[in-house]
Image (cartoon, rainbow, N blue to C red):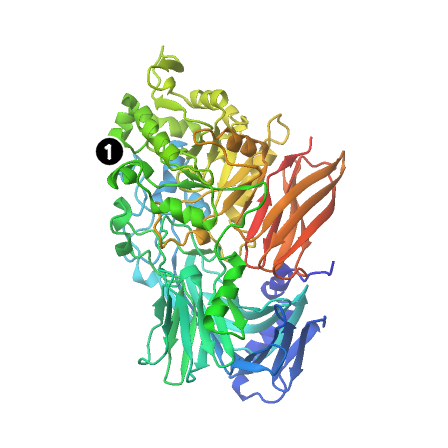
Amino acid sequence: MPKRVQRRDLLKGISGGFGLLAALESRAWAAEKPDERAGALECDLSRYKKIDGLEALVAGDALVVTWDGGKDDKLRLRLAIENGTPTIREIAIRQGGDWKALLSNATPDFRFVSGYRRMDREQMEPLHDLGIPISAEIIQKDKWNAFWDAPLMIPGTEPSGVDTPPADGIGGQPGLPRRPEEVHRGTAVYQAGSCAVVTNGSRLEIIFPGVQMGDVFTGHLQYTVYRGTNLIRQEVIARTEMPSVAYKYDAGIKNIAIGPASRVVWRNIDNQWVDNQLGGPVEAAPTVIYSANRLAAAELPGGAIAAFPPPHNFFWQSELDINLGNSWCRKDSDASFAFGVRQAESQASQAMAGRGPQDTRENWALRNARPGTWQRMPVYFYVSAKDGQAAIDAALSFTRGDKYKPLPGHQVKASHFHSNMVMRLLELGGLGATLPDFEVAKAAGVNIWGPVDGGQKGPATSGKKREEVAAAMLAGSHAENLAVYYEAARLHSDRNFVVMPNEEIAFGLYGGLDVALGGHNDLMMSHPVYWNPGRKPGEKLVEDHPKYGKLYRIGTPDDLMEMARLENLLLYMPHPRAKGSTAFPDAIKDQPRFQDAHWHGIGFRWGLGLDGSEERLSDYRCQQVFDDMNNWIADLPTPPKMIQAISEFQALGFTSDFYANNPVDYLRLDRLPEPGDWDSIIDAMKKGDYFTTSGEVLIPHYALEGEGDKRTIIADVEWTFPLEFAEIVWGDGNKTARQVIPATEFAAFGSHRFDIPFDATGKKWVRFAVWDCAGNGAMVQPVKLN
C-alpha cells in the first residue's frame, strides 16, 4: 500500500514554521511585488511522484495537471499565479478526441462571516442540577457544543430551546446581548508567490500559500484532483487565533467568461429544471439558488461544471429541514459570472410559519473554529463533457441520488424525529391520514423510521402548556397518549416500512425522573409498553390494567431500568455532552444504570459542535465519548456501549433536505418485523449487529477473526467518494489509541476487502471505521476482547 502523506504532517509544517509549506509561506509573504514576477512558475515538486493516469509538470508560467477521469474521460487543469492570485488558466476535458476547454483565466471565490461562540442556557441546566458551578473554564470548554446559539443575530434573544423561565440560579445565555463588532465579514485575499505539488495515493494536492480572510483566518489555497473521477476539490485551509470564532463560508469560481450559450442550471425544490441565462443586469450580491440535492452547474463551451459541498459536514445541526439555498450564482459584468456553494446566515424564521412554537426562535449555530485548528472550507466541482443536467446527475451519483443503498440482509433505520406525529395526523383528519415525513423517509431508502414523540404530546395533553403536560402525565394521561401513539405507528407500518414509536425522556417532564437518570435519554420500544410516571410509596411497579394489560408506574431511574429489563427495551443518550445532556454520560459512568446492558449507548449525528478541522463526522463530541464509554466499562461483565444514528428534525416536508442531515443504521435483519413487534430490531441493536453510516460508505460484512492476542479484522467496504483512511480504534480501559490505514490510493466508486492483522495484547475492546475524502464514513460497533 503506497505511503500516504498525512494531512496533519502537511499542516504541521505550516503551524510549526518549518517544512515545505512553511518555506512556501515565507517566500510568498516575503515577495514585495509578486505581481511583477515573470517567467517560469516557482513550484516545489519534491513531494510529487508521477503515477499512471496522474501527472503534473511546470510549463512556463503555469502548472499543468492531467489525469484520467471516469470512464474514457481525460481532464486537464492549468494553474498559474496572476498578481499573487492563484488562477485557473484552464479546465479542459477530452473524450477520445480533441481537448475541450470549458473555462479559462477564472479565479477562486471564498467569502466568510464569523461571530462569537457562546454557551447556551440549555447546556447550563444539567450542570446546575449536578451542582457544578458555571465557571469561565466550564463555559470555555462546553461552548463548542452549543446548539441554541445564533452568533450572527444582533443583538440576540434567548434561543434556549426551553419555553420555561430560567431555572433557579441560572440566567440566560451568557454574554447577551451580542454586539455588531462581534461580526466579521471578509473575502479571501491571495498573496501567493509559488506553489507545491504533493502526490497523495491516487490524488494530487496543489498548494498555494498566502491566503488571508479578513482579520480572522490565515492559511493557504489547495486544489485536489483524483485519478479515476472528474472531481476537483477547491478549498481554503486556514486557522485563527481568535478565542471564540463561529463562522460560515461560501465558495466557488469567479471570472468565468459569458458565452452565447452560457447559463447556470439546477433542479429546484419541486424537482423541476430551472436556469439562469445570465442575461439580466450586473449583480452586486450573489443570487441565492434553492437547488435540490445541493447542486448547480455552469454550462460552458465544451461541457459543464457542477458545484456542490461535502454532503454532510457542510451543515451544522439544527431542527430545521427546510432548504435555505445551498447554491449561488452572480453576474459580475456583461462578460463574466461566478457560481458555487453557500451557507445561509440565518434559519429564515419566516419559512417556519405554521410549524410550531419555534417559529420565532432563532437557532443558527454555525461552524466552530477552535483557536489554532486548521479549518477546511471545501467546494467540489464535477467536470463533464455534456450539459449541465448530465453534470448534475453525474455529481449526484456520489450520494447515490441522495438515497441509502439497499443491502441484502440489511434494513435501514433512522431515529429520533420530533415529528409530533399523533397531533399532526389528528389535525389532518385522523390517525389514518398521512404525513410527508413517511414519504420523505421512504423515498430516501429508510424502512425503519423512529419518532421520539412518546406520550408527551397526544390527545390527553393536547393544548396544554409544558407544566400542564407534566402534571397531566403524572395524573395518568401518559399511558392514554401512548395508546394512540402505538395505534398511529401500527396504521402507518407496511411490509416495506415500519414505524418504531420511541420516546425521548427529556428535561422538564416526567416529574424529575430524567434528572436522576442523567441528561436526555431515548427509550427504544420492543413492543407497545404502557407506563405512567410518578410511582408513589406503596404502589406496585406493575399492575394489571383492564385496557392496557400490564401498566407500569415509574418513580425512579431504577424503576425505569427494571421496566427496560422486563420488556426488552433499550435506553440511549441522543446528544451526549451537549444540550440537556451536558456533563453526561460522564456524571453517571459509575452508576449501575449506566453499566446495565439495557443502557445501550449514545446517538450520532454530525453538526452539533461541528468543527471544520474534523477528519471524522462528529469527531470532537461523539467519537470521543463513544470511546471513553467503552474504557469506563472495559473490565465489567457488560456488553460494549454502542453508537446509533439520530436525527434532530421537527416535522418534515416534501422539500426537506433529508439525506444531508440524517445518518442511518444498517441493521442485519433478513426482513422487517410485523407492526407492533420490534423485538428483532432491539435484539440486533443489543448485539451490535449493525453499522452506522452517513450513506456513502457501506460495510456489508465485518468480522473479528481468530482467538487470543492474534486476531484479524475482515471488512468488506464499498464507497462513492475517494477514500481517505480506514482505522482500527481500541482501548485498554484507560486510554484510546488507533491505527490509521491510509486509503488514498482507492479511487471513487469502489469496493475492497480489508484484511488487517490485529494484535490484541493489552487491549480490552476494538472497533473499525472507514472515512472518505469528503468526511463521510461508516462505523461498526465495538467488540470486547476479554
Q: Quadrant of residue 466?
A: top left
Give the residue displayed 30% in from the left and 44% down from the top.
172
The x, y position of residue 191, in whole percent, is 52, 78
Depth order, front residue of 509/142: 509
Give the residue displayed 25% in from the left and 39% down from the top.
429
Q: Quadrant of residue 544?
A: top left
Establish if 551 lies above or below 692: above
The x, y position of residue 134, in whole percent, is 39, 40
Give the residue displayed 66% in from the left and 59% down from the top.
746
Query: Which quarter of the rendered picture does the C terminus lie within?
Result: top right
Outermost top residue: 538
Query: Which quarter of the rendered picture does the N terminus lie within?
Result: bottom right
Establish if 398 lies above or below 110: above
Taking the image as drawn, is residue 237 in sight? yes
- SS at mark 1 in the image: loop
Taking the image as drawn, is residue 506 in sight? no
User: In the shown orientation, is residue 513 left or right of residue 732?
Assistant: left
Establish if 167 lies above or below 210: above
Depth order, front residue of 25/45: 45
| Tag 1 residue | 462
The x, y position of residue 294, in whole percent, is 43, 62
Outermost front residue: 495
